């Protein structure tokens, strides 16, 4: 299959591309790039968790029995380790949940819907609730909005964050806008890192709804391909400096740091927001899984242990991403209206193809044995108005398979572009010279 794909170099005509695609269809291939899943090699980095925490006693220091009920906020040692690293908030202003940060986001929006944010009426009492959604964005965020009947208002994403002119205009004029999704570091799927200027504008902007909240998903806070000398100030710090400490509600988890589905999720924000959250938890749980918290604490040890562990993750991810980016640069760089993101961390590459081609590329790739995230998933309502954006997720594949998949995707982009150009040429009205002939 790799040989057949490599013969398609980007200079072929339509019939050559179709012959190449037919050869791909005739060769059994099954490469899945639909989700940003950690590879088997990455998961193996955390196999030691499977034998932890062991029978050794543990003292949380707050009188809680780690083998019994209680400890609603989570053990203080784990909050001291993860709250500053993943959320950028003081340990006292974070709470540990279950294994899923998405579940915490869904629950927090549900709580705002039922009871309102501190000092404000329930969202359910409003005629309409709207959220700003940077696009391309994360389909799970859109799903949470849909599940609560929240209308989504798209705003364009740039290389350094959302279009802040549009954001500021919306939130200043429309009191129905109660929240906004943010992924400040290695955003899904573009890989953007919000600049200090964007963070400052988010923190200081005028808002029409007094309970407007930034729902900050810090899923990739420590997921750099290469260690960073220093990190930008966080969103919470920017909001505190602006005198708006209640503006952000932050979420993170270790799901892509240790074992997916068996991680630790956290929520954090101002002391006022944390009290609001913890007061509501008494109705739904007697406490989180403290055994898993101790397990993670003993596995990581300290912040240096987290850094060492994530450096290994970054190296493995960079190997896979480099393969995809090299293929795209070799095969697609001369195509008009085709470009892609160059992330420095996270789990995704965004590939933009000519308008009207994305769904066709996904279909062609599936026929050739590479499954991609459905076109439109990156936009509100699963509809990309221009049908241009594709989310590429190389993480689960081996480096060799990532290159193989990228080669097939590139060939499918070339084929889709060639078919579109041919169709356009056939639809072109005849010129005067054509008529004379």
Image: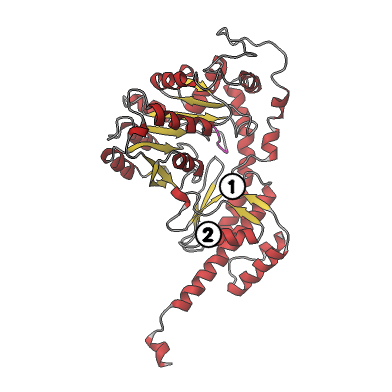
The residues bearing labels 2 and 1 have C-alpha atoms spaced at a distance of: 16 Å
Question: Can you name the residue that lies furthest to the top here?
Answer: 63
257 and 407: which is toward the camera: 257
Q: Is residue 387 left or right of residue 396?
A: left
User: Residue 367: image x %, image y %?
Assistant: 64, 61
* First to last magenta residue range: 221-225
Q: Is residue 426 above or below residue 384?
A: below
281 and 165: which is toward the camera: 281
Predominant SS along the magenta part: loop
| Closer to viewer: mark 2 or mark 1 | 2
Which quadrant of the figure contains the C terminus?
A: bottom left
Q: Secondary structure at mark 1?
A: loop
What residue is shown with label 1? Answer: 393
Tell which circle, 2 or 1, labels the residue nearer the N-terminal end.
2
The residue located at (59%, 47%) in the rendering is: 393
User: Residue 301: image x %, image y %?
Assistant: 62, 20
Q: Is residue 333 left or right of residue 28?
A: left
Q: How many marks?
A: 2
What residue is shown with label 2? Answer: 359
Where, by quadrant of the figure, is residue 2 drawn? bottom right
């Amino acid at each position: 299959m790799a040989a057949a794909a490599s013969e398609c170099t980007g200079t072929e005509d339509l019939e050559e591309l179709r012959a190449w695609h037919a050869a791909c269809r005739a060769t059994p291939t099954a490469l899945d790039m639909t989700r940003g899943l950690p590879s088997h090699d990455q998961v193996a980095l955390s196999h030691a968790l499977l034998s932890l925490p062991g029978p050794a006693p543990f003292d949380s220091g707050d009188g809680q029995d780690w083998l019994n009920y209680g400890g609603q906020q989570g053990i203080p040692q784990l909050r001291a380790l993860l709250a500053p690293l993943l959320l950028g908030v003081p340990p006292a202003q974070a709470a540990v949940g279950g294994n899923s940060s998405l579940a915490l986001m869904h629950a927090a929006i549900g709580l705002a819907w039922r009871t309102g944010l501190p000092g404000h009426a329930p969202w359910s009492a409003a005629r309409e609730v709207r959220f700003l959604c940077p696009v391309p964005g994360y389909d799970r965020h859109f799903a949470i909005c849909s599940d609560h009947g929240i209308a989504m208002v798209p705003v364009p994403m740039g290389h350094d964050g959302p279009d802040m002119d549009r954001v500021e205009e919306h939130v200043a004029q429309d009191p129905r806008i109660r929240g906004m999704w943010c992924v400040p570091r290695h955003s899904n799927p573009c890989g953007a890192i919000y600049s200090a200027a964007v963070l400052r504008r988010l923190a200081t902007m005028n808002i029409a709804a007094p309970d407007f909240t930034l729902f900050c998903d810090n899923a990739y806070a420590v997921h750099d391909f290469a260690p960073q000398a220093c990190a930008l100030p966080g969103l919470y710090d920017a909001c505190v400096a602006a005198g708006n400490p209640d503006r952000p509600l932050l979420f993170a988890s270790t799901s892509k740091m240790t074992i997916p589905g068996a991680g630790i999720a956290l929520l954090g924000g101002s002391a006022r927001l944390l009290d609001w959250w913890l007061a509501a938890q008494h109705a739904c749980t007697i406490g989180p899984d403290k055994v898993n918290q101790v397990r993670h604490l003993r596995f990581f040890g300290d912040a240096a242990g987290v850094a060492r562990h994530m450096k290994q993750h970054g190296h493995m991810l960079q190997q896979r991403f480099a393969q995809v980016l090299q293929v795209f640069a070799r095969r697609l760089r001369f195509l008009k209206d085709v470009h892609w993101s160059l992330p420095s961390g996270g789990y995704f590459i965004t590939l933009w193809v000519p308008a009207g081609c994305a769904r066709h590329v996904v279909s062609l790739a599936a026929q050739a044995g590479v499954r991609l995230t459905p076109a439109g998933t990156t936009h509100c309502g699963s509809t990309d108005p221009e049908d241009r954006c594709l989310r590429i997720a190389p993480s689960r594949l081996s480096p060799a398979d990532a290159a193989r998949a990228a080669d097939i995707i590139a060939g499918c982009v070339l084929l889709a572009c060639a078919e579109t150009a041919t169709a356009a040429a056939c639809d072109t009205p005849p010129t005067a010279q054509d008529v004379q002939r």
